[in-house]
Image (cartoon, grey):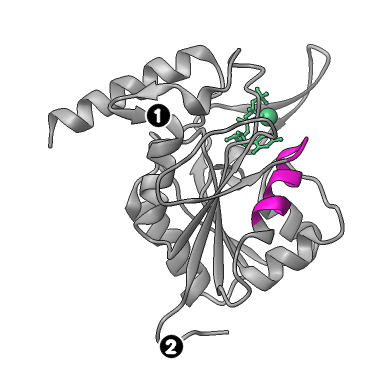
């Protein structure tokens, strides 16, 4: 399917996690002159007509310019909740982790363009693996996996809205959205990801993000 003319895009920013590995809800912590979640929403807004932020059940946060909905126990439940707030006529929906504050507008545009122009059901940012990768059982190596065929994937992940809705409609669970679409039989393409678009997962990651923000502000 090729679109000619205007295609409508919305983004769901999932921010309903509790940050167990980090030790706190990391998405609310300060980063530069805003919170982590505000960075994710700000860049999403550059390519989106609307942004839905999915927040924890008991939270009273507000995010400027975004529709707020309550999330669920798993990331997939939170995406399902977000999808309910995306208007029916939207062509392309992106899902982005609030915990990835450093994605650029250029990356969002690459993901949108791949879904809009390439005929795929979805597109994800991927990075080549630089380490050698091994499959292990307990701490014994079973196999060295050829890394040429592997990518590690990030968000934003973009999809034809109808496909993402159908894929999530049956209670699917996954650690990302593309895996749910893949299990549904959808085609997903990979676009170039960004090294700085790491997910804040452990405490040291926030320090690393602060260093990137300081560098970006320095070059402005
Ligand atoms: N997320 C969500 N709803 C959940 C779980 C996760 O919206 N029930 C969101 C997180 O807020 C985060 C993104 O999904 O922006 C990626 O998840 P992750 O990095 O795993 O965050 P947490 O689940 O909060 O961290 P942890 O797994 O360490 O508890
Ligand atoms: Mg998690």
Q: Residue at x 63, y 60 (%)?
A: 85
Is 196 displayed left or right of 147 in the figure?
Answer: left
Q: Which residue is the site of mark 2?
A: 4
Q: Residue at x 29, y 25 (%)?
A: 32
Q: Residues within 10 Å of mark 1 (few under 14, many from 20)?
A: some
Residue 7, placed above or below residue 95: below
Give residue 209's position: percent from left, percent from top: 37, 24
Q: Residue at x 43, y 65 (%)?
A: 49
What main secondary structure does the magenta stretch of the protein show? helix
Q: Residue at x 46, y 19 (%)?
A: 205
Q: Residue at the bottom extreme? A: 4
Give residue 39's position: percent from left, percent from top: 38, 38
Quarter occupied by the C terminus: top left
Of residues 84 and 216, the one drawn nearer to the viewer in this rendering: 84
Q: Which residue is the site of mark 1?
A: 35
Question: Picture quarter containing residue 94?
Answer: bottom right
Judged from the image, the quadrant occupied by ligand 1 is: top right
> What kind of element bears circle 2?
loop
Of residues 202 and 45, the one drawn nearer to the viewer in this rendering: 45
Give residue 164's position: percent from left, percent from top: 69, 63
Mark 2 vs mark 1: in front: 1
Question: Picture quarter containing residue 64?
Answer: top left
Q: Earlier in the sequence, mark 2 or mark 1?
A: 2
**Contact, mark 2 vs mark 1 (Cβ under 8 Å):** no
Q: Which residues are magenta?
A: 72-82
- Is 73 within the magenta? yes
Residue 55, placed above or below residue 137: below
Structural distance between the alpha carbons of marks 2 and 1:
37 Å
């Amino acid at each position: 399917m090729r679109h000619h003319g205007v295609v409508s895009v919305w983004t769901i920013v999932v921010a309903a996690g509790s940050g167990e590995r980090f030790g706190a809800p990391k998405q609310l912590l300060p980063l530069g002159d805003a919170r982590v979640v505000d960075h994710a929403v700000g860049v999403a807004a550059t390519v989106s007509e609307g942004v839905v932020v999915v927040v924890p059940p008991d939270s009273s946060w507000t995010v400027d310019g975004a529709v707020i909905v309550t999330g669920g126990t798993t990331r997939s439940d939170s995406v399902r909740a977000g999808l309910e707030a995306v208007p029916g006529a939207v062509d392309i929906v992106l899902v982005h982790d609030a915990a990835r504050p450093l994605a650029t507008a250029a990356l969002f545009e690459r993901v949108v363009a791949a879904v809009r122009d390439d005929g795929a059901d979805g597109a994800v940012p991927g990075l080549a693996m630089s380490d050698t990768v091994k499959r292990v059982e307990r701490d014994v190596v079973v196999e060295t996996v050829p890394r040429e065929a592997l990518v590690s994937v990030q968000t934003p992940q973009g999809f034809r809205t109808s496909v993402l809705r159908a894929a999530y409609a049956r209670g699917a669970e996954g650690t990302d959205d593309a895996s749910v679409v893949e299990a549904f039989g959808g085609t997903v393409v990979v676009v170039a990801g960004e090294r700085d678009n790491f997910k804040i997962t452990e405490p040291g990651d926030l320090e690393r993000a602060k260093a990137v923000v300081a560098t970006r502000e320095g070059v402005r």
